[in-house]
Each structure stands twice: as structure tokens, then as C-alpha cells.
Amino acid sequence: MSSDSSTACGNEPLLEVRGLRIDGQTGDEWLEIVKGLDLTLCRGEVLGLIGESGAGKSTLGLAAMGFVRPGCRISGGEIIFDGIDLTRASENEKRDIWGVRIAYVAQSAAASFNPAHKLIDQFSESPVKHGIKGLADAEADAKDLYGRLRLPDPDNIGFRYPHQVSGGQLQRAMTAMALSCRPDLIIFDEPTTALDVTTQIEVLATIRDIVDQFNTAAIYITHDLAVVAQMADRIMVLQYGELVEEADTRTMMSAPREQYTRSLWAVTSFRKETVPKVAAQPLVEVENVTAAYGRDTVLHDINFKIYRGQTVAVVGESGSGKSTAARVITGLLPPQQGRVLIDGEVMPGNYRKRSTAQLRHAQMIYQMADTAVNPRHRIRDIIGRPLRFYLGMSGTKKENRIRELLDMIELEPDEYINRFPGELSGGQKQRICIARALAAEPDFIICDEVTSALDQIVAEGILKLLDRLQQELNLAYMFITHDLATVKAIADEVIVMLQGRIVEQGARDEMFTPPHHEYTDLLLSSVPEMDPDWLDELMIRRSKEGAMDSRSTS
Amino acid sequence: MSAQPYSGGGAIWRELKKAPPSAKFGLAVICSYVFVALFAPVLTPYGESEIVGSAFEPWGEEYTFGTDSLGRDMLTRLLFGARNTVGIAFVTTCLAFLIGGVCGILAAAMSGWVDQILSRIIDILMAIPALIFALLLLTIFGTTISALIIVIAVLDSTRVFRIARAVSLNVVVLDFVEAARLRGENIGWITIREVLPNIMPPLVAEFGLRFCFVFLTIASLSFLGLGIQPPTADWGSMVRDNAALITYGDLTPLLPAGAIALLTVGVNFVVDWFLHKTSGLRDE
């Protein structure tokens, strides 16, 4: 796009990709998934790649190393890394570059480490094998880097196995490993997507420090705009394997040129109208519930109420007990103490003991729509089953109701009714799950992270749909999420959970205006904002306040 | 787990056309065996146990493959043997899958003590060598065809149980099964409608393999004299009856043995192809 970007490097660019085309194989056909992209990266520069899933950003990121996934092939263009054309380089040449001069940090560090080896052994493997350092030097270097990445107890943490450290620590250990040979280029592929906000911010800050300290160039792949705003000097927006727009971060954030970019920027704007509590009787009451898995108590004396037509958002990081609360309400986990009332009626603790009518009241929508619908059932059967099971519908009556439900979730009945879930996109599958829940004509739906596996634009569509259905059908939602932007968008009431306890609850607007509980404050302040200076300012503020309490760093 | 939906007749035909030669060969073998089994009375010149000449007549115009030790036509008995051996093996395999499959999915879906009891029973059954156990049971219950089918089916269902339970364990933890439980569905629905369709590919592949083993077990039991009883024609006992001819350089006993081998190879080709399709592996 901008032809002056190569001259901006001063001398030679570190990485130059020209007219890159990559094909992916589906069945027997080759489809073009990267359609002639150009990319220039200078030494010490951080380039952000953003786009929805399927935009080709990961494929491009891997291609920058000269690597393509099995089932893909480079069909045109060149990738020049420091004078070497990686599309023509032999496997041996590439092997000398990978890990030494170009490193890769994957989304899930937990899946990328070998669980059978200690962290420090995995760190040392590459520099020792490539003859850059001796084992002792490499280990000393590891301890140094662990310290710089602010891992606790840097001298000893390396001698743990991957399962003995937390997800955020593992992601930092992975970054340290990527730095072990002091590469010229690191590719970060969604390194913080799987982390909680409080942990994410730590990892982001350390990644940026390290990139500055070593003057490393980086390609940062993410779908989170606020994150990319903190990390990148320059941003490329991709869609369907093509470049939509490229500009430096500040220009891009303040004045995006293209319609598509603006639509990406606008998605966080959805706000639901808050509904005042009208009914005197709460629909769902959770009273003094304590629950445990085996001997581990995961819920301590939980109390909350949900009213008809309202959305209660439950937030907290992973392990805070928010999903467990949902399992207690549905009866999957009978509570040890306390009780659950729906519509004034005490529910038996175990779902097996509940009547069909009691089960019908509360429906559930899951995080992973892929596994929440049976891949071997047609859409007609998936939605039709609750109609028959709960309401005894059959024949034309059932068929008409299925079509009505498909209309409600904005899918064309004639086109979708005979399909299998495998023939739908992620967002469409989630809509089918919503239709299945609605088919039971419930009063109350538990939404467990329903949008966290979806792209922002698709997620926004789902949130709007849920909101419309709520208004039409006067439904109550319990909305479990770790994403505070979603909470801002849809909640009437907010419950903040930490380590199995409710630390704060109240109306949405109260929750988002100070004063907060200390933990709520930490959560809220950790949500990245679109402002490129946000991270710097936050880190300065926190270091002044000394607010980095031991909990967030551990 | 591939989420490939079932396809209609046209799609199956297209898949068949793309099949590798080995799979086509296997299918052709299986089809011809089925054809022979179904139409044996029409295809054969004589009756199944009709004595048509003297013992051990040579190959020739009148008796294509000669006659056996009692003077029955070899060709006739070979063709009828397809009907008996293959037919009984098929019924037995189906029964084994019915018992093993249902118990396996139930064990996975219900877990707890149901799983414990079923699994331990299966462990005990598997601890005893199958052929010896079969010999023992057949001696007790007699060598009728129904006893043969039930004994082999029960003994073989242990392996089906193991595989059905193992693959079901991966399915029963998925959210759609949880959704069905929370809907209040009974265990029958969960077993047959939710879990079974999702474990079909490995089960079908296993069906082909188990069929071969059942087939071989019946043949070896017949060879030992405890399988299908005379005068019913079956390949195992035909090998035994005519084994003596081998010493005189006559190939006749190799014909039923070859029929067994050919079907085994054919079924395995088809199973390999099917496994290849469902596991999503690609040719290098």
C-alpha cells in the first residue's frame, strides 16, 4: 500500500513480503486464502495484524517465517528475510533461521510446551543445539530473562514443569523461550487471547518492554483492537486474505479510512437499554449456596436474585466459580448447603430429580456452539426435539414452529432447516443453540460465555439478538463472561466473583462508576482501551500506587 | 472427530468411484460372496449334501473341483459353504455389536457403578483365552448353530464393548449430551440418538475387522469339529475333511482355505479404505 514504508526504515527492511499468495486445500480443490499481500517490517518495529477469523492473519504470520501449515501451499510471491528468500530456501536453511533469527509465540502456551520437560530445559534446547551458548550460559540467560519478564522467583521457576505454573506465567515463559537466541523477529499469534484481563495486561506490558529492550521486530496477530492499539507501531487490517487498510497506529485509531475498518472500530458501541426491576417476585433466587467438587469448596455462601426481563452478568477470572454457580442452578452440581428457587419453587438439587416442567424453565446456551449441538442431527431435529419433548408438538404444528423459531433467530428457514451443524458458521451455530433454548419456551436462560469464541462483529450480532428476544419474550438472562465490554453492553445487574465468593454486586451503572471494591477496580482498570497511550499511563499509575499487589503478579 | 454429515445415495456413488483399486477389489469380492450365498441353490449343479459319485473324484467335466471324502461335489459344497460360513459369521458379528455396543455406550453414559460392573465382567471374560473358552462352552451347550452364534457373539462382544466405551467416553462429555440430560431425556435417547451416531465411523471400521475374526473363529472351530456340524457345508470342516489330499499333491483342500483368505483380504481392504476416509488422513 504505502510505498514509502520501505524508505522509512533507513536502510534495508528486515522482512519484506511481496505479492504473497497462499492456497489452502479443501477436499480436492485449492482455494486462495492469502491473495497477494505485501508487507514490510523494519528492525525494531512492531506490526499489528488484525481481522476476523478466516482473514488469513495467522497464515500470513506463519508465512513470514517461510512456514505454511500442512494442507496449504505458497503459490506466488516472495518472502525476503534479511536478504534470504524464504520461499526458495531449503529446509536446512530455514531450520537455521527458525528459533534462532525468527521465533514464534503461539496462542496457547500450555499446548506448545512439552509437558514432560522442565521449562528451563526447553528454554536451553534451542541455543545449545544451534551452538550459540553452552548449557550453563543458557540457563543463566534464562534466569535473567525470567527476571526481566517479571516472573516470580526467576532463579527457580525454570525448574518447574509446565503444569506447575499458571497460564499467564507460562505465556511469559514462552516469550522468554522465544527470546533465548535473541531473534531479529518474533511472531506473536494471539498470545493473550486465552488469558484473563488481569493476567493479559501483565503479559502485554512485559512483551512490550522486552521488544523495546532488545530492539526486536515483531508481528503481533490479534483480533482485539484495544490490544493491538497498545502493542503495535503500525497496523494492517486484513479481510478474506486481502489488505483492507494499513497505517500507523495513531492514524488508524483516530481516522480509519475504510468502511470495514470503521465497522470493526464501532462494534463495541452496542448498549442495551437498562430495564428497571418491575416484578416484586424474583424469578431465580440463589440462597446461601455452598458447593464443592470433591473436597474443594468452590462456592462459598452465594446469594443473588434474578428478576424477569433482566440480565444479570456474572464476571470474574477463570476459576472464580462463575460457571459452577450456573451448574448449581441447572442441577448438574447439587449444592452442599443452600437452595435454588425458580419462580418461587424450590428446585431439587440434582437435575435428575427435577420434573420435566421444572427443567423446561431454565435453559442453557454454551460457550462452544460446536460441541453444544449434535453434529449428526439436522437443524430440524435439533430445534424440533424440545418442541416434541416439552410441548408434545408433532407434524405440521412442529414444522411451523421450527420455521417460526428460525425466523426469530434471523436464519432463512428454507435454507437452513435441512442442514447439519457442520454446514454452518460459528455464529450461526450459536443462533441454533439460542433457537433450541427458545423452543422450550423458558423464562430464564443461562448464557455461559456465549460470545467469547466469536469474532467481534458476529458476537455483536448475537448480543443484539439476545437483547431483542429478551424484550419480546420478557426473558431473564444469567450472563457468564470474563469480558467486561460485553458486560457493559448487555447487563442490568453485575455480580463480580473472586475465588468462589461474590465480592460486589449491583446495578450496571453503579458498578462502572467509582468507588469500587478493590478487585472490581483491578478488573475494570485492566480492560484495554482503544487509546494507544492507555497501557503506558496505566503502568505508570500502577507503579506509583504500588497497586501491583501480589495476587495479580502471581 | 470429523463432523462430516451423512450423505445421500448420489454422494455414496461418487465416493465409490473415487475409491482406490484395492477397495474396489474388496467390494467386488464381498459382493460376489453375497451373491453366491444368496443364490447358491440356483448356481449349483447338485444338492448341498447329495452324494453324487465315489470319494475323491478328480477335477473334470462332471465335477469341476472333484468330489470329497464321501463323494459329494466340491463346487456345490464350496458355494453352499459361502452361505453357511459367511451368513453365520455375519449374524454373529451383528449380535456381538448389538451386545457390546449397547453395553459400551451405556457404561460410558451412565458411568459410576454400572460402568464398574460391566467393565469388570468384560475384564473377566477377556482374561480367558477366547478359543479355549468357546470350546468349553460349546461342549457344555452342545454344537447347535444357535449355541455357536450366541457363544461366539458373547465372547466377541467384549472387544466391541471396549471400543464402544472408549469412543463414547469422548462423546458423553460434550455439551450436547449435557444439554440432552438437562432436557430430561432418558438414557435410551442419549444412547441411541445422541451418542451412537457420533461413534459410528470407528464402530463400522471395527465391524469389518471383527467380521473377519468371527469368520476365522467359526472356521477354526469347525476345523476342530465343534463348529458347524455335518452334513452342513462349511469351509472350515471342508478343509479338515479333505486335508489328507494335500499329501498327494492335490490342491482341493486349498480351495475352501483360499475362499476364507480371499474374503478376509477383501474385507480388510474395504475397512482400510473406510478408516482412511473417516480419519481424514491424506495420501502422501
Image: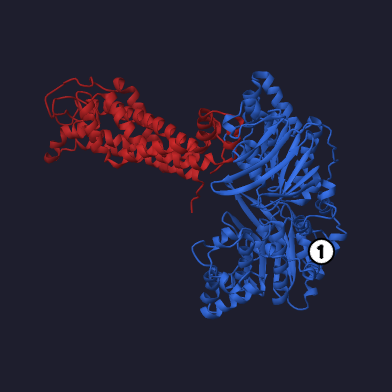
Whether residue A360 sits left or right of residue A113 in the image: it is right
Q: Residue at x 65, y 41 (%)?
A: A289
Q: Chain of mark 1?
A: A
Q: Residue at x 50, y 28 (%)?
A: B188
Which amino acid does the dot numbered 1 rest on? Trp
Whether residue A96 sits left or right of residue A202 in the image: it is left
Q: Position of residue A3 (x, y in %)?
A: 81, 68
Q: Name the residue tied to disc 1.
A: A534
Q: Secondary structure at mark 1?
A: helix
- Judge by depth and name the residue closer to the eye, A305 or A229: A305
- What colour has chain B? red
- What colour has chain A? blue
Colour mapping: by chain
* Number of numbered discs overlaid on the protein picture: 1
Q: Position of residue B223 (x, y in %)?
A: 20, 34
How busy is the neighbourhood of tag 1: few (under 14 within 10 Å), some, or many (20 plus)?
A: some
Q: Quadrant of residue A362?
A: top right
Q: Residue at x 81, y 55 (%)?
A: A516
- Judge by depth and name the residue closer to the eye, A308 or A184: A308
Q: Position of residue A379 (x, y in %)?
A: 64, 32
When the figure is inspected, residue A138 is found, relative to residue A266, above or below; the finding is: below
- Judge by depth and name the residue closer to the eye, A288 or A196: A288
Whether residue A502 sits left or right of residue B230 in the image: it is right
